[in-house]
Structure formats: C-alpha cells, structure tokens
C-alpha cells in the first residue's frame, strides 16, 4: 500500500475513470432504431420490420463501439460491444420461440373446447368440416382417443424403461466400478442416446413384425400395436433414465455409503435404504423429464402404432393414436382437403395446445418433485 | 466388552500401489490409541483396514493379519458386514443421513440391520446412545428433526451416537475434529475420554496436541517420499513419544522440525 | 489359524521382497461371504445392464434382418428399387439432404445458443436469469411436431426473403431461383426446414451450454475480475476456455438431434429431387422420407425404408462417436 508521504513523490494511481452514464446503451439503442427506420424508408421506400431490425442492430453496434472507444477506451468498448452482441442474439432468438408459444396458445386456444377433448374421429366425414367452414355447424371430431393413446403408450413405456433404466444406473454406479461391462454399458447408453427417434420406431416395428411373421405369417400388420410403440419409446427413454439416475446417484456423497457400511449394513441395504432415499427426488424428476421428452415423440409412434380414428384401450391389438401423431395426421392429411382443411388444422392446433400444456406440466412437476422431496438440510 | 487388536505384518495396497508396508502393532482394550504422522503416510488407511472399510475402495486390497481377540478379521469366511458391526467408525466429516431425523439416525444401524426393536426399547437406546455421546441434553426436544440441521460439532457427536448405538467393541475415529471449531473439539475430546471406559478407541489425528491430550498410546507413521509406502516408525506410550522418543524421525516430527 | 491371507516373501504367491522393486505387489482380496440379498440385488442390476446390450444388439440385428430384402433386390435387380437405379442412387440424395439441413441448423443455432447461454448466465439481471433458464428448458421440451405445425403456418412469410436472396445472392448456387426465375411459393423448402430445425435445437444446445457455463468455478471468474478484467475479458479468460469441451459436446448433441429429426422436416418440406438450391422446392432427408412413405409402404418398399433407417442410424452413430472423440481430446486440457 502506498503511504501518503510516498504518494506525494510518486504518481498516485487514479481509481476513477471516465465512464458513460448508465442510460447510454438504451439511448443509443433507441437512436439506432430511429435512424434505421429512416434509412429503411429512404432506401426501400417503406417500413419493413426485418430490414429495420438488421439495420438497427448494425448501427447500434457501431455507435456503441465508436462512442465508448472514444470516451472510455478500447477495452471498455470491446466489453460493451460484446454485451450488445450477446444481448441482441438473445432478443433475436426469443422472437421465433415466443412466436411459437403465441401461435400455439392463440390458435389452439381459439379452437379448443370440451367436445374436442371428449370425442374421437370415428365416423368423421369431410362434409362435417365443410359445414363447419361454411359456418353451418360447430367443429366436429376430437382427440379423446389420442389422449387415451398417449397416456396408455407412455405408461407402458414407463413400465418397461424405468426398472431397466434405474437398475442399470445402480449397476453402473454401485457395482460396475471400472470393469469392462460397465464401460461397455456406458458406451452403449451413449450410443442409444443418439438413436434417431424414427430408427427406434423402425426397430420396434422390425422386431414385432419378425415375431408376427413367425407366429402368424398370414396376419401382416398385426405388428402395429400400442405395445410396439411403447417398446419404441422405451428405446428412447431408457438411456435418458439411465443418464439422469446415474448422474444423481453419483452425487450421493461416498461419506453416506461409508457411514452405512461402517454400521455393519450390507451393500444392497445401503443402496436401498440410504442411497436411493437420498436421491429419490432427483431420480423422480429425471424420470419425469424423460417422460416429457418421449410423450411428444411422433415418428416412432406413426411407424409402430399407425393412425387410429377410434378409441382403443387395448395396447396389444389394433392401431392407436397419440396426440403427436394426431397432430401430424390432421395437418398433413385433412379429413376434407381443400378449403375445409382449415378445420383439421384447427383440431391439430387444439391438440398441440394440449400436448404443449402436458409437456410443460410434466416439466413443472419435475421441478416441484425435485424441490419438495429433496432431503431437508435444515440449515 | 472391548477387544484387543493385534496387527501383524500388514501390507495395504491400492491396486498395484503399496500404500502401507509391514505394520505390526498391538492395540490394548479400553484405551485410546492415536495414529499420527504427516499427510499421506497411511495412518487413515491403516485405520480403515481395522473394520474392513478399506476394501470399499475399488482395487484396494490387504495382506497380513488383523486379529481381534485372536480372530483374524481377514480370515476365510469372515463377513466384512459382521466385522463392521463389531467395529464402529466415525469419519472426518460428520455425515448424518440426510433423509433421517436425529432419532432415526441414531437407530439407523439397528434398523438397517433389520433387527426388530420395540418402541420403548428404541427410545431407551436412543437416549442411551445420545447420552453416551454427550448430546442428549442438547437434542432431546427435537429428536424428530433432521439430523443435518444440527451444528457441525453436534452432527459429529450424532455420528458417534449412531456408531455406539450398534454396541460395537471398538470405535475407530478418522480425524473426527478436523472440521470442527475449538469448542466442539473440546467436547469431542472429553467424550473420547469417557468412551475409553467401554471401548477400544483408535483415533487418527493431525493435531499432535490432541494426540497428547486424549491418547494412552501413540503410533507414528511416516513416508520416505511420494510414491513410497507408509511405514510405522514408532509405537509407544504417548508420554514417551512426546517426551523422549526412541527414533530421531519421531523427535523431528514431534518438535516440528519435520522434513 | 487361517493363513490364507498371509503372503510373505517365502509364500508360493511369490510376493516380491518389500523394498527391492517397483514390481507391483498384490495383497489378496479376502473372499468375502456374499449375502443372498446382495447377490439377488446385484444380479438384478446386472441383468438390467445386460438388457441394454441386448436391446442395442437387437436394434442393429432386426433392422439388418428387415433390410435383407432390399439387399437382395440390389443384387438381383437394382431397377426394382425406388428410382430405378439401385439403392445407392436412391439413398445418396437423401443423405445429402440430411447432412445439409443439419449443418445449416447447426450453423445458425450455435452462435445464438452461445449468446443466450452467456446472456442468461453472466449478463442478465440477477433476478431474471433463473427464470430465463427455466423458460429455455421448457422450450427444449416442446415436441417437434409442434415446431412442424408452427413452421407450416409461417413458411409462407419467408417467400419474400427467399425472393430477395435469389435476387441478390442468386449467383451462389444454394440461393439460385429455378429456371423460371421463381422461388418456392409456399416457402416449404429445405432452407425453411433447416431454419425450423435450428430453432428446434436452439433450446437444447442452449440449456446444455448454460449448465456448463454455470459450472465455471466461481474462483476462476473472480480471479479474472480481480486482475482488472472487464466482464467480456473475464468471459474470454475463464468461462469460454472452461466450457470449450462442453460447448463442443452440446453442439454435437444438437447435431445428433437435427440429423435424426423427422417431424419438423416431414411436415414442412414439400419433397422433391435433389437440387442445389435451398430456396426452391425439392430435396428430402432420410428421416422424413421414412415418415412420409412408411404408412403406405409394404413389401420391398417397406424394406427399403428400414434400410435407409439403418443408414441414418449408422450416420448418427458416426457423428456421435466423432463428437465423443472431440470431447475426449479437448477435455484433457480443458477442465
């Protein structure tokens, strides 16, 4: 530390430096937008949002750098420009995402009603949609069957993948150590994470149609059932469950396991009574995330369960629809092509709203589970 | 109910690395034995072989004998789980089970060993163990609160209570005070003094004053350098070690001229 | 007294002399008594692990089994395969389409993802940051079919932009208009599909990168600030180097998602032959080819689709392995 007597002789360092007022970035931003609108008008002869946005962004950046560099110095200027660029990237990226949510809520919200939720597409005819578009009838059809299908197939997928996933994670963390099998499984789980969803669907279809060919060669198409779809989803879900559970189990401090062993508790009991209860919130929320992920899958369902119009409660026979395949089918193959296709599109948006709400709900649930069930530290 | 431990020719390995070489010592019942030495000298490793916690670490192994009242705990057919029920352990960092209340923590060893225990017995045992750990008066009104809500020193005493609730013969302590403030340390040291009436206590400590205060006998470990195995240099009465050690190495370490 | 654990220099195990040799000694691991509970439980977990091996082997095996018909047709009579010129000239344009759309998606999404991740971790107001992070996670969970629906609804708005692109940048083949000087009227082109893909993978890459940025050791950041670094310099000195391998792996994960993404492309793209230009209709990706043709397919066509699925599987496998190799290399010095 320089003492006062010293500072009279040496040049003391200056702790203050020139700094632009706090509001400067905002002022520059607003000014840039105005300038951009003016330039846009002069060059293109009109007001065009994308053009103005791009221009304003560029002008803003140059202005910020020039002003800051001349007043605050180069380093500060670079910092400001970086901040501006990152912030603009953020704002720009938010635009499509907000638009997506907005469209879903506005279009889906406009179409949705209790009838859509409680009816199926059984007996749906193009004429009904044409009447609706002509304003002579209310929107017919619905996706009750798709909701039921989604729930059934997802539950079946959970029944298959949760035990396999959680037990595998336990094996990897508690038993495998660094042995070869453990490494192989870790590697294959990684590979599985990368399987394209449609390939998972093709696998399940290939598996069951091979079996069906062996059992009943004459009944082709018997392979497409809700259960086949559940197997396809399991292929996608297992690696997520394994990864999430593994991560959580590794977070359980070694201390706790050792404390339990030191009390003379066998290993399996330590795992069941100490390790799992400590990590249960994390495991459950990981599973919920996995469900949210597979519940929106479309491709594997359409190649394994087809597109059903009717309500089907039987996982093991007949086609089934889920919300995603319903959305796809309605949008691309409307009941009544042409003018009245808009009716199918409206149903698709309504189903999309339900699906998005479901996924969001599951994600929220995962958060709540993680919070509520987490071990209380009390401090 | 405490036991004598005879360590004979004990070599300890982590994979291919020989961590501790040729240790032999006799630990007397109803006494406190302190293991001291610089970091990495293998004193904690030796401690962990006494209840077969060492082998929890993948790749770790042991050769030699550890006799507990004449029975080799590394003998054929010995179940480490049973050994650990006889030999309790307290760790460097207090580690109460976060999902359990104070009472459940104390009873954890008994409950997890699937012994049925009546409610009144459970209450008795809780009180006995907590009194044994000098914690009863501080927590008797909040037995159902999570154990992790206690202070560091209280948590460590809770862990001691948890260890003595399974009624072991021997109590191992791995630097039990290293994460605690002086007042909590004092409380634990007082407790160790009380515990030796009933248990064989072995304590690893970094703190030489602590070894001098609490132990009857002291073992000094050292290593020749990194990558070399740790060795037992001297094992003697604590008073001898700290006042008039046989070996110069011990003298240097005790007096702080280490290196 | 059991002596089985005693290995001395004279023992048959030939334990080396205590001091003479770096030759690793071996303590014997005592044979522990295995409790039935332990045995059952570890067996259960082991079986689950092995099931995963079986599933993956099954994926490869059953896809191969169903592909045999195509392979046979390719050998006997290549002209029977869709397109009439054999399997490779059928699958080639699809592979190109898949790679191009994923590459564009990645190029567009990564810088934005980094921007958002940095903004939410280091620049946004303290109170806003966790909320933004949460919103990003939610967006990452929106099903792709919804993105597809959204893409269809808005694709038409892009035609003006494409017209402008072809007018000014038409000399670059990928932005060229067709022979009539027009671009796609519906906007349902590969570029649109790629852009929607990029928006789809944006939240995924962001949320992974964000997590990595959040893990930057606070001490390193403070060390940089304590040296008098500005915020941007701090980010360049500590945050970015720390997250390097994480960013690479997040990007690769995004690429994997984009490669295998079916619905957004299947819904948006009006498919056609392979063309260089991305602003006219045409092109197709493997995943959407399968999705669009599978419901009506039977016999050889079905087998063809499964075979190109196998091709897609192999491609994503290669990309993932490449990603892992990159991550393994960079993370050695990185963190």
Image (cartoon, rainbow, N blue to C red):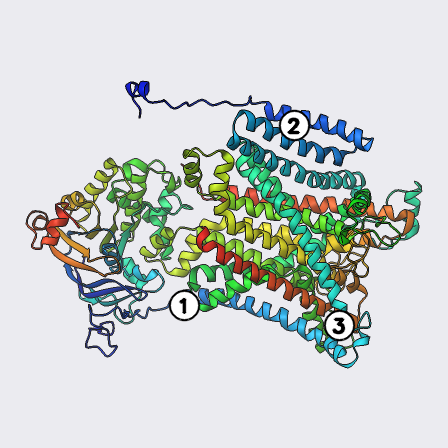
Work out whether residue C75 or residue B254 is closer to the camera in this orientation and state it. C75
Query: What percent of the width, then of the height, locates residue A135?
Result: 92, 40
Label 1: which residue? C36
Q: Is residue C106 left or right of residue C323?
A: right
| Residue under the image location 69 percent in, 56 percent down | C261
Between marks 2 and 3, how big is the CA–CA gap?
56 Å
**For residue C120, which quarter of the picture?**
top right
Mark 2 crowd level (few <14, some 14–19, many ≥20, 10 Å Cα) = some
Q: Of tags 2 and 3, which is closer to the observer?
A: 2
- Is residue A378 visible to us here? no
Q: Is residue B227 left or right of residue A281?
A: left
Do circles 3 and 1 both sit on a common chain?
A: yes
Tell me, for residue A303, which label it has, or none. none
Tell me, for residue C87, which label it has, or none. 3
Do circles 2 and 1 both sit on a common chain?
A: no
Chain bearing mark 3: C
Between marks 3 and 1, how big is the CA–CA gap?
55 Å
Query: What percent of the width, then of the height, locates residue A106?
Result: 77, 38
**For residue C150, which quarter of the picture?**
top right
Q: Of tags 2 and 1, which is closer to the observer?
A: 2
Look at the picture and state if B54 lies above or below C246.
Answer: below
Label 2: which residue? A29
Q: Secondary structure at mark 1?
A: helix
Q: Secondary structure at mark 2?
A: helix
């Amino acid at each position: 530390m320089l003492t006062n007597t010293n500072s009279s002789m040496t040049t003391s360092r200056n702790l203050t430096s020139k700094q632009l007022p706090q509001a400067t970035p905002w002022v520059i931003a607003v000014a840039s937008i105005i300038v951009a609108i003016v330039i846009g008008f002069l060059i293109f002869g009109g007001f065009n949002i994308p053009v103005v946005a791009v221009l304003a962004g560029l002008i803003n950046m140059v202005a910020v750098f020039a002003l800051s560099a001349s007043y605050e110095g180069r380093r500060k200027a670079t910092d400001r420009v970086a901040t501006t660029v990152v912030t603009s990237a953020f704002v720009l990226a938010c635009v499509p995402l907000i638009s997506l949510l907005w469209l879903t809520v506005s279009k889906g919200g406009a179409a949705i009603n209790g009838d859509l939720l409680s009816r199926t597409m059984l007996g749906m005819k193009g004429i009904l949609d044409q009447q609706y578009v002509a304003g002579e009838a209310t929107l017919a059809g619905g996706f009750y069957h798709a909701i039921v299908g989604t729930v059934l197939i997802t539950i079946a997928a959970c029944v298959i993948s949760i035990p396999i996933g959680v037990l595998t994670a336990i094996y990897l963390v508690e038993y495998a150590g660094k042995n070869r099998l453990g490494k192989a499984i870790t590697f294959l789980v990684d590979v599985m994470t990368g399987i394209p969803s449609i390939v998972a669907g093709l696998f399940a279809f290939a598996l069951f149609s091979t079996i069906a060919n062996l059992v009943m060669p004459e009944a082709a198409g018997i392979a497409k059932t809700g259960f086949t779809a559940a197997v396809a989803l399991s292929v996608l879900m297992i690696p997520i469950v394994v990864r999430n559970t593994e991560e959580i189990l590794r977070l359980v401090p070694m201390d706790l396991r050792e404390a339990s062993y030191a009390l003379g508790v066998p290993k399996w009991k330590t795992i069941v009574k100490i390790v799992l209860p400590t990590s249960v919130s994390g495991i459950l929320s990981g599973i919920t995330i996995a469900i949210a992920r597979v519940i929106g899958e479309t491709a594997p369902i359409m190649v394994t369960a087809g597109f059903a119009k009717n309500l089907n409660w039987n996982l093991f026979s007949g086609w089934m629809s889920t919300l995603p395949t319903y959305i796809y089918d309605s949008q691309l193959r409307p009941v009544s092509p042409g003018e009245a296709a808009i009716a199918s599109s409206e149903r698709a948006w309504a189903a999309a709203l339900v699906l998005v709400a479901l996924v969001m709900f599951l994600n929220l649930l995962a958060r709540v589970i993680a919070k509520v069930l987490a071990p209380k530290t009390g401090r | 109910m405490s036991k004598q431990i005879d360590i004979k020719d004990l070599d300890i390995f982590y994979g291919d690395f020989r961590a501790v070489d040729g240790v032999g010592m006799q630990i007397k019942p109803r006494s406190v034995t302190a293991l001291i030495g610089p970091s990495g000298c293998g004193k904690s490793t030796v401690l962990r072989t006494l209840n077969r916690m060492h082998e929890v670490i993948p790749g770790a192994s042991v050769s030699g004998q550890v006799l507990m009242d004449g029975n080799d705990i590394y003998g054929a057919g010995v179940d480490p789980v049973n050994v650990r029920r006889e030999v309790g352990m307290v760790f460097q960092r207090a580690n109460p089970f976060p999902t359990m209340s104070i009472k459940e923590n104390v009873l954890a060893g008994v409950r997890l060993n699937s012994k049925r225990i009546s409610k009144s017995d459970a209450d008795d045992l809780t009180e006995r163990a907590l009194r044994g750990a000098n914690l009863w008066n501080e927590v008797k009104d909040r037995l159902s609160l999570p154990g992790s809500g206690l202070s560091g020193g209280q948590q460590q005493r809770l862990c001691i209570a948890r260890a003595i609730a399974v009624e072991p013969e021997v109590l191992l302590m791995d630097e039990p005070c290293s994460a605690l403030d002086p007042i909590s340390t004092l409380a634990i040291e007082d407790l160790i003094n009380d515990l030796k009436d009933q248990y064989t206590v072995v304590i690893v400590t970094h703190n030489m004053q602590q070894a001098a205060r609490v132990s009857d006998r002291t073992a000094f470990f050292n290593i020749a350098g990194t990558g070399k195995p740790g060795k037992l240099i001297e094992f003697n009465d604590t008073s001898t070690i700290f006042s008039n050690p046989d070996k110069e190495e011990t003298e240097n370490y005790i007096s702080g001229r280490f290196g | 007294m059991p002596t089985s654990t005693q290995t001395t220099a004279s023992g048959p195990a030939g334990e080396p002399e205590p001091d003479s040799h770096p030759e690793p000694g071996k303590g014997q691991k005592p044979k522990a008594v295995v409790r039935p509970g332990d045995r059952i439980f570890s067996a259960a977990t082991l079986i689950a692990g092995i099931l995963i091996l079986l599933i993956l082997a099954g994926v490869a095996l059953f896809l191969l089994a169903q592909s045999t018909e195509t392979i046979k047709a390719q050998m006997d009579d290549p002209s029977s395969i869709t397109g009439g010129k054999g399997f490779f000239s059928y699958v080639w344009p699809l592979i190109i389409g898949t790679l191009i759309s994923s590459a564009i998606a990645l190029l567009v999404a990564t810088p934005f993802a980094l921007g958002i991740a940095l903004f939410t971790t280091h620049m946004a107001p303290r109170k806003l940051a966790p909320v933004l992070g949460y919103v990003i996670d939610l967006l990452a969970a929106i099903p792709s079919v919804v993105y597809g629906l959204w893409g269809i609804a808005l694709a038409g708005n892009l035609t003006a932009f494409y017209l402008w692109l072809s007018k000014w940048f038409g000399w670059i083949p990928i932005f060229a208009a067709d022979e009539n000087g027009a671009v796609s009227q519906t906007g349902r082109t590969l570029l649109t599909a790629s852009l929607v893909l990029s928006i789809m993978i944006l939240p995924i890459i962001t949320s992974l990168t964000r997590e990595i940025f959040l893990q930057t050791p606070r001490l390193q950041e403070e060390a940089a600030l304590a040296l008098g670094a500005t915020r941007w310099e701090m980010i360049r000195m500590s945050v970015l180097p720390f997250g390097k391998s994480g960013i690479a792996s997040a990007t690769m994960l995004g690429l994997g998602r984009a490669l295998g993404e079916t619905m957004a492309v299947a819904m948006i793209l009006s498919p056609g032959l392979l063309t260089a230009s991305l602003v006219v209709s045409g092109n197709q990706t493997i995943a959407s080819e399968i999705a669009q043709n599978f419901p009506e397919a039977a016999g050889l066509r079905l087998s063809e689709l499964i075979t190109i699925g196998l091709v897609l599987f192999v491609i994503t496998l290669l990309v993932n392995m490449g990603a892992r190799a990159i991550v393994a290399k960079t993370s050695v010095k990185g963190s």
